[in-house]
Image (spheres, helix red, strand yellow):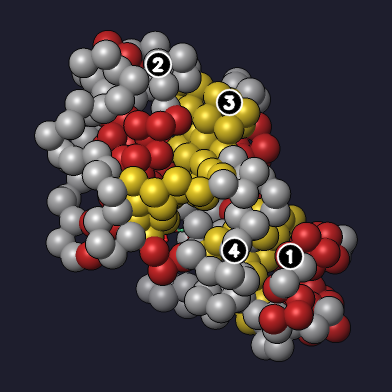
Amino acid sequence: MPASSLQVAPPTNVVEASKQLAAWTAVDKHVTKDCQVIGIGSGSTVPYVVERIVAQGPEINKDRVFIPTGFQSKELIVDAHLRLGDVDQYPHIDVTIDGADEVDKDLNCIKGGGACHLREKVLAEAADTWIIVADYRKNSEVLGVNWKKGVPVEVAPFAYAKVLHNLRTLGSTDPKLRMAVMKAGPIVSDNGNFIIDAPFGEAEMRDPMTLLTRIKMLTGVVEVGLFCHMAKAVYFGNQDGSVTAKFYDGHAEHYDKPASASDAPAGTGV
Ligand SMILES: O=C[C@H](O)[C@H](O)[C@H](O)COP(=O)(O)O
């Protein structure tokens, strides 16, 4: 296998720069030498995660296995010449790093803006440590404040109309089947299912665990894009170039001088 390498375009605006800072800092803190099985999440922040892992060097990466959460992350792993594995071979993952659409003060997340949340939740549960990386726009007190599109719900196609009806009964204001852009008809997930986006009011979003449980009980629902009490830490890249890390035990850390392109990645001994 050729040595790992990956070309990621350098950030051209503040949002992209903050995604990169969050991703690099999280990799430096959590993808240590002893991590051998690593889950790679989905979305626009994750390429920076893979970029930083590749920068740890071929020696440290040659014996590692990388597990994708969907088509996009599989392509990233392959393009970077990293070793690809699957969760059925490696049901126990050392660390998974993923993005999020929104994160609340208790580190509960909305995920699934890219329709990947079923596999993402499997890789989150399989991991000893599940870490989120995101830009400052995702940092909220309550879910649904910044992410207005609703809770992504993956459904078996034949059940979608019944589940739409069920979601209205549960209080969703205007649940909608997610439609494709360059294709007539609905989005189809990597698992062959449909996605419903179900907005809920603040009262429901203040108790995401209860909402998750109610939606998940609906027959035909495959997975819900609410990830509750799962993250060990969330890294937010800030507008001013700093990074804020929030941890599951309630403490927070602030890094004024995060990793820069010229720094050797931490934990690699280089
Ligand atoms: O289904 C997609 C995933 O949950 C993504 O991790 C999420 O949408 C965040 O993506 P981004 O980093 O592009 O904001």
The numbered mark at residue 93 is 3
Tags 4 and 2 in contact by the CB under 8 Å rule?
A: no
Label 3 secondary element = strand
Residue 91 versus residue 239 in the image, above or below: above
Counting residues from the start of the chain, the first of labels 4 and 3 encountered is 3
Residue 216 place in picture, x, y as percent: 81, 60
What is the three-letter code of the residue carrying label 2? Lys
Sequence-wise first label, 1 or 2:
2
Q: CA distance from mark 1 to mark 2?
A: 35 Å
Label 4 vs label 2: CA separation? 31 Å
Which numbered circle lies on residue 33? 2
Q: Amino acid at mark 3?
A: Ile
In-front residue for pair 35/47 = 35
> Of callouts 4 and 2, which one flags the residue occurring earlier in the amino acid sequence?
2
Which image quadrant is residue 126 in? Answer: top right
Residue with the mark numbered 1: 208
